[in-house]
Image: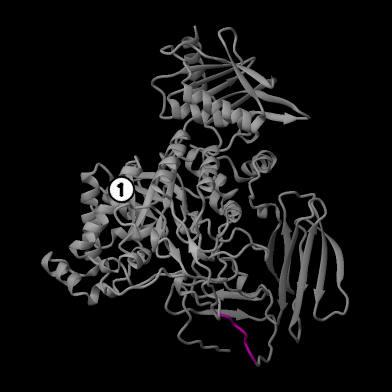
């Protein structure tokens, strides 16, 4: 009877319309959510159907432990076995989509599933379905049917720039599991630290795991200062085995990254003989890209292969990430050994030498039944058809790889770099630069429109990257990751995403409370109003765009032109006009405090002769920099470090734009700022010409 019932539920579910998804509390949103009338109340102890081993619907010991743990920790609910009528029944299915599960909530819960992984996903959805009001737990009666769209749903973590403990790594994995991520990309080595014990080469951790200084503030700060305290750490092989097992229990595969040929200064600090110069250097305490990389001589390959042997033994997943990014060819060009490799292998240049390097490592990994994955630079100089590309410099590399028939993981900096700023407030913690708000992450689609159906089949999925140059504590790491990771989970799991307003309602109504209960230091930046600047005939208006249309803001305006501050109440989405000055420059500071939430926002505006004036761009700005026509004349000064919303960016060698003042004016000076951030490929102009 149970088998027939489950089959009927599955067939019925296929015909359902994705109605009422906006009220489903589960994120990422299920494929089907059909709410019915009524409520199922949940007692503090629930009975579980536990059939004898071998029966359809038998719950394994590991699955039972997972369910018990989730219910107890998230809702203080205990469980008991029963052979009678159970509160939760289970049914294993065949001939359903990969990782498929369904949950039917009527007078009891019926969970149907394709495999153990799908069952775990059902458990995560179940704990999100349970709501609590005045200590009463309940679930709205409904039917859920669900399965993931993409196979690769990842989060990355750089532990080289800043180190995180075993317990912190496990917490990172626990949070991933809640939102059904299945791949943890663990960036274990880089210039600033080697974090994995390699028994054959003990100096990798004795020397390479520690640096004697760390740069303060931002890389582009001037003058640069340093914290001269010794910093570092590493994971023993036993600790790594423990973390791998911990992740596997949560159906998360760990992909280790061992950087090569570039980003290898920490390794070369320990073993300089594998560089091109052989010169002993310390582990750098500054961020950036360094000329010293692995040499391409045979001894280096033996060194790397021996390292990979131990890495392979620790990580059972099929992928090993080799980096391959940002490898300057400066040393290779002057190295006799590298030039001999180019000559003896009929290579054209150093780019083909990098391809030779990567192919040599890939051949070795393949011999060990592992697959190579690397950043999109591995495309340069030619690529093996067996390699998988992780496209980070936009999606261009991913598109090229898909068209060649290589598998791809999309992780473009435009949408998936969580070390970027997520809010415009001055209170945001220091970050590397860029601007990737929650809405931008939600827009992410791993499949570019340029790909046809066949080419798109090579897209495995996507992930977000957490580079930690400016993330020194786990609390800050949580702040940068959540809730943006939840928005990403929608892009990687959902067949069809619900609208952003519906997602945001579920996020703030349900999941912010859940994150609070888990003591996650998530960002509340999205709760702040967006300050919109609009050009007007007489100057510029600012508008507090709030998702709550009834929100009011206590507003204080401090002006260099007035002795006293102006106080007023500004409604959400109500424009406030700032008339442009007719003569002198006026500095204004606007402070907004939400009457409802108490959340504060500030903005500084310099009122000048061209405030909000019309601007004509003969050279079109690059949209990657969150381009808005008013940015250049909105009265805000662009700051350092670079924030994507403060500057206009161009990718042309010659730039022309015209500013049209409303009236003829005699201009004695023009104040214009340029940003230099070479690490982000942002450069100063060679010359500037102003015409009238």
Instruction: Give the residue at x 21% y 55%.
Output: 360
Q: Which of the two residues, 65 or 608, is positioned nearer the viewer here?
A: 65
Q: Secondary structure at mark 1?
A: helix
Q: Quadrant of residue 201?
A: bottom left
Point out the stretch of residues depicted in magenta: 669-674
Residue 586, image x and y in percent?
76, 81
Q: Quadrant of residue 103?
A: top right
- Quick one: quadrant of the C terminus? bottom right
- On screen, residue 634 above or below 547: below
43 with respect to 626 (left or right): right
Inspect this view and state whether residue 20 appears: no
Q: Which of the two residues, 146 or 621, is positioned nearer the viewer here?
A: 146
Which residue is the site of mark 1?
A: 310
> Is 670 inside the magenta-drawn segment?
yes
Q: Which of the two residues, 3 or 515, is positioned nearer the viewer here?
A: 515
Residue 243, image x and y in percent?
45, 42
How packed mark 1 is, by other alpha carbons closer than 10 Å (few <14, some 14-19, many 20 or more), is some
Residue 380, image x and y in percent?
28, 62
- On screen, residue 348 above or below 146: below
Instruction: Give the residue at x 56% y 36%.
Output: 29
Residue 307, image x and y in percent?
29, 53
Instruction: Give the residue at x 54% y 66%.
Output: 433
418 with respect to 129 (left or right): left
Q: Which of the two residues, 13 or 377, is positioned nearer the viewer here?
A: 377
483 with respect to 321 (left or right): right
- On screen, residue 66 above or below 92: below
> Is 304 inside the magenta-drawn segment?
no
Give the colour scheme shown: one colour
Could you tell me what secondary structure mostly forms the magenta stretch? loop
Inspect this view and state whether residue 329 appears: yes
């Amino acid at each position: 009877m149970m088998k027939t019932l489950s089959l009927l539920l599955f067939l019925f579910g296929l015909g359902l319309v994705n109605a009422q998804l906006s009220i489903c509390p589960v994120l990422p949103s299920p494929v089907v959510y059909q709410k019915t009338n009524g409520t199922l109340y949940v007692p503090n102890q629930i009975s579980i159907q536990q059939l004898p081993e071998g029966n359809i619907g038998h719950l394994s010991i590991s699955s039972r432990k997972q369910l018990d743990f989730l219910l107890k920790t998230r809702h203080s609910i205990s469980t008991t076995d029963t052979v009678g009528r159970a509160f939760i029944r289970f049914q294993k299915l065949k001939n359903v989509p990969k990782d498929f599960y369904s949950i039917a909530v009527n007078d009891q819960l019926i969970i149907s599933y394709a495999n153990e992984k799908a069952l775990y996903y059902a458990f995560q959805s179940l704990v999100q379905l349970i709501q609590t009001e005045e200590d009463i737990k309940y679930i709205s009666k409904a039917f859920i049917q669900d399965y993931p769209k993409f196979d690769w749903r990842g989060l990355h973590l750089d532990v080289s720039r800043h180190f995180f403990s075993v317990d912190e790594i496990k917490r990172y994995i626990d949070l991933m599991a809640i939102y059904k991520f299945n791949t943890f990309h663990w960036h274990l080595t880089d210039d600033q630290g080697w974090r994995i014990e390699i028994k054959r080469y003990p100096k990798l951790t004795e020397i390479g795991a520690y640096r004697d200084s760390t740069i303060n503030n931002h890389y582009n700060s001037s003058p640069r200062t340093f914290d001269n305290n010794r910093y570092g750490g590493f994971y023993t092989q036993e600790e790594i085995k423990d973390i791998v097992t911990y992740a596997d229990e949560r159906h998360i595969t760990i992909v280790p990254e061992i950087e090569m040929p570039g980003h290898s200064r920490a390794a070369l600090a320990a073993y300089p003989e594998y560089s091109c110069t052989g010169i002993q250097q310390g582990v750098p305490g500054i961020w950036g890209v360094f000329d010293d990389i692995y040499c391409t001589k045979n001894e280096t390959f033996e060194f790397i292969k021996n390292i990979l042997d131990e890495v392979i033994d620790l990580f059972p997943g099929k992928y090993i990430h080799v980096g391959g990014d940002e490898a300057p060819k400066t040393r290779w060009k002057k190295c006799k050994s590298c030039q001999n490799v180019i000559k003896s292998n009929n290579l054209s240049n150093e780019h083909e030498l990098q391809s030779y390097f990567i192919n040599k490592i890939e051949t070795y990994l393949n011999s060990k039944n592992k697959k190579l994955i690397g950043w999109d630079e591995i495309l340069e100089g030619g690529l093996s058809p067996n390699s998988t590309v992780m496209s980070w410099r936009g999606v261009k590399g991913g598109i090229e790889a898909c068209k060649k028939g290589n598998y791809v993981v999309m992780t473009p900096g435009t949408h998936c770099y969580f070390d970027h700023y997520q809010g415009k407030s001055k209170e945001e913690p220091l970050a590397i630069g860029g601007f990737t708000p929650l809405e931008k992450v939600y827009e992410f689609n791993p499949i570019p429109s340029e790909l046809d159906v066949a080419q798109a089949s090579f897209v495995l999925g996507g992930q977000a990257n957490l580079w930690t140059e400016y993330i020194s504590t786990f609390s800050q790491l949580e702040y940068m990751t959540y809730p943006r990771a939840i928005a990403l989970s929608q892009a990687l799991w959902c067949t069809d995403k619900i609208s952003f307003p519906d997602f945001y309602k579920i996020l703030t109504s349900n999941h912010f409370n859940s994150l609070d209960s888990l003591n996650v230091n998530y960002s509340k930046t999205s709760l702040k109003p967006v300050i919109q600047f609009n050009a007007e005939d007489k100057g510029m208006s600012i508008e507090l765009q709030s998702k709550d249309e009834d929100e009011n803001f206590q507003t204080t305006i401090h002006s260099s032109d007035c002795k006293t501050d102006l106080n007023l109440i500004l409604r959400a989405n109500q424009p406030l006009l700032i008339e442009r000055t007719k003569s002198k420059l006026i500095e204004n500071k606007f402070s907004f405090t939400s009457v409802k939430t108490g959340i504060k926002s500030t903005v500084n505006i310099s009122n000048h002769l061209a405030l909000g004036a019309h601007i004509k761009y003969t050279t079109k700005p690059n949209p990657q920099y969150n381009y808005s026509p008013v940015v250049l004349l909105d009265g805000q000064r662009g700051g350092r470090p670079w924030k994507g919303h403060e500057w206009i960016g161009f990718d042309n060698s010659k730039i022309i734009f015209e500013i049209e003042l409303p009236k003829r004016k005699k201009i004695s000076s023009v104040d214009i700022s340029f940003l230099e951030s070479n690490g982000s490929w942002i450069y100063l102009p060679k010359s500037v010409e102003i015409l009238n």
